[in-house]
Image: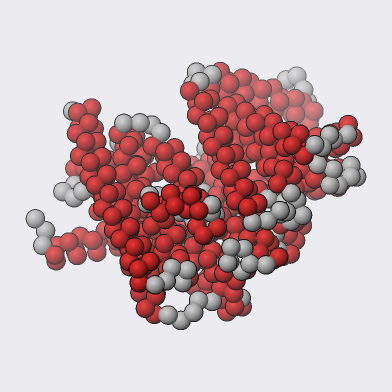
Amino acid sequence: MTTGGRGTGEGGRVRRSLQVLAALWRLNVAEELQYRANFFASVLGTLFGIGTALLTLALFFRHTTRLGGWDYWEVVVLLGVFNALTGLIEAVLRPGIGELASDVRSGHLDLVLSRPVDAQAFVSFRRLDIWRLTDVALGLGLAAYALYRLGHVPSALAIATFIVAFASAAVVVYAIWVVLMSLAFWLVAVENLAVLFDALYEGARYPVSAYPGALRFLFVYLVPIAWTTTIPASVITGRVGPGIGLAAVAVAVAAFALARLLWKLALKRYTGASG
Amino acid sequence: MRGAGGWIRTYGALIRNAWLVDLQYRASIGLWMLWGVTEPAIALGIWWAIAGAGPVGGYARGDFARYFFALMLVNQLTIAWDSWYLDRWIREGDLNFRLARPLNPIHEAIADNVAYKARSGVVIVAVWLLVAAVWPAVRMPFDPARWALTILAVLLAGLMRFFISFATGLLAFWTTRATAIMELHAGVSMFLAGRIAPLALLPPAVAGVAGVFWFRYMLAFPVDLLTGAVHGGAAVQRGFAGQIVWVAVWFGAYRLAWSRGIRRYGAVGG
């Protein structure tokens, strides 16, 4: 499809998508700033969540000194990464692509498709709940504190690799959301598809090495949960070398490509059904 | 007033209705169930790894497997979502037409729970039997007397969790954060009700707190009864006594919140 006006072709389309999204986010931020009480509720909720997670770990470590070969503060680093990713999910993905099922059911998706922007990008990034971004800061803060308790100072290369691995983790999480939510095109009656993600993501709370073999295989190769928390935490604690960064990028690219492919297939089915 | 026959007819109609509504949403219910068993499955995975080096506090790997399978079943049979429904009914006004009926809305909620739990309980038992066919660790010893006692304890725990959820949901008459209070309760019950570990593995002081309040009786007691961790007449009697007391307390809380809340709700609407 060619576009009129300023940009033409794919380049103009991308630029316009970005402009539209930036405008939407400005609107969201202005809207959210009216409800500052939500900020405190959000922070309290996060602190409570981190508190219960730390108590759970303390309970496990009452009866063991290592979990899948990780000691207490190493698992806390992982928990920090888990919370930071949760922040991204709650700020962007759940309010955006998480609403896809109800958009498909209500036909609201038609309105999105009629817009001259990339539908996947628009559906995915249309909302921004800024208060939940504090979870990212709290999570990374927790990870930093745990590193301090470990007495481990990561090298500059390890930090750079961590940034790559964390960005890859965000892409993998995004791809999982796209794949799961695309099921809405086939299972129209199911409104709580996001629950599928929550169930899977529970597995990311602990290092994959703590799980029995079959589950570990599932998390590393089939549903790449291992790449969301275990790998970034392994990088920053120095359990694995910086070479893993390349693998993380490869996994992220593959996951994104698969998700994009499924999205296209699903959309073809949707336009086929209504057109 | 309705006679016994009238109540049976009323409940028959309500349960049939709830069953048919659930049938439309069976895929959604399947997902909620999946989500419900994930947490115990992950906890089992972790304890399984920890117990690889030898029994933990008297729990060997097989004991953990039986504990968490029993937990999945008992949790599914006693879980109550009513505070979320009530919060929506009160905030969005769906409560109004329910108040216009000549029947307290709590009966509809009870019927919903019966239909939902009958369906999901059968699924969990079926899955458990399938898993037990290939994995001996989760097989329960054949003990009909214990199972009968467990059914009674599950009924009491279900009643208790229903009244907890219903009474907390009624707080929506006063606050917009009723469901947040329920989440808080869920967070505390992770530890005190035995969702993350058998109470025997908690620090003794924490486990003591769980036994003083309702947490032990809403989940851990029926689970321990089923797996055989609670045995001996005195311990069983104490458990049932705790259940009966806390069912009564939460029933009282529901009555209080309902009568006060309705008065307030009527005053606002009238």
Relative image position of residue A48 (x, y in whole percent): 54, 37
Where residue B216 appears, x then y in whole percent?
42, 56
Of residues A223 and A259, the one drawn nearer to the viewer in this rendering: A223
Across and down, in percent, residue B111 comes to 29, 58
Figure quadrant of residue A148: top right
The C terminus of chain B, quarter of image: top left
- The relative height of residue B28 versus residue B256 in the rendered view (above or below) is below
Residue that appears at 78% across and 31% down: A10
- Applied colour scheme: secondary structure
Q: Residue furthest left?
A: B1
Query: Considering depth in this image, is B241 or A46 the residue closer to the camera?
Result: B241
Residue A7 visible in the displayed image: yes
The residue positioned 61% from the left and 19% from the top of the image is A26
Query: Can residue B116 be seen in the rendering of this structure?
Result: no
Vertical comparison of B150 with B160: above or below: below
Image x and y of residue B130, in percent: 55, 75
Residue A125, relative to residue B195: is it above or below? above
| Number of marks in the rendered image | 0
A261 vs B190, left or right, is right
| Residue for point 62% across, 32% down | A135
Q: Residue at x 54, y 52 (%)?
A: B203
Please identify the quadrant where the N terminus of chain B is shown.
Answer: bottom left
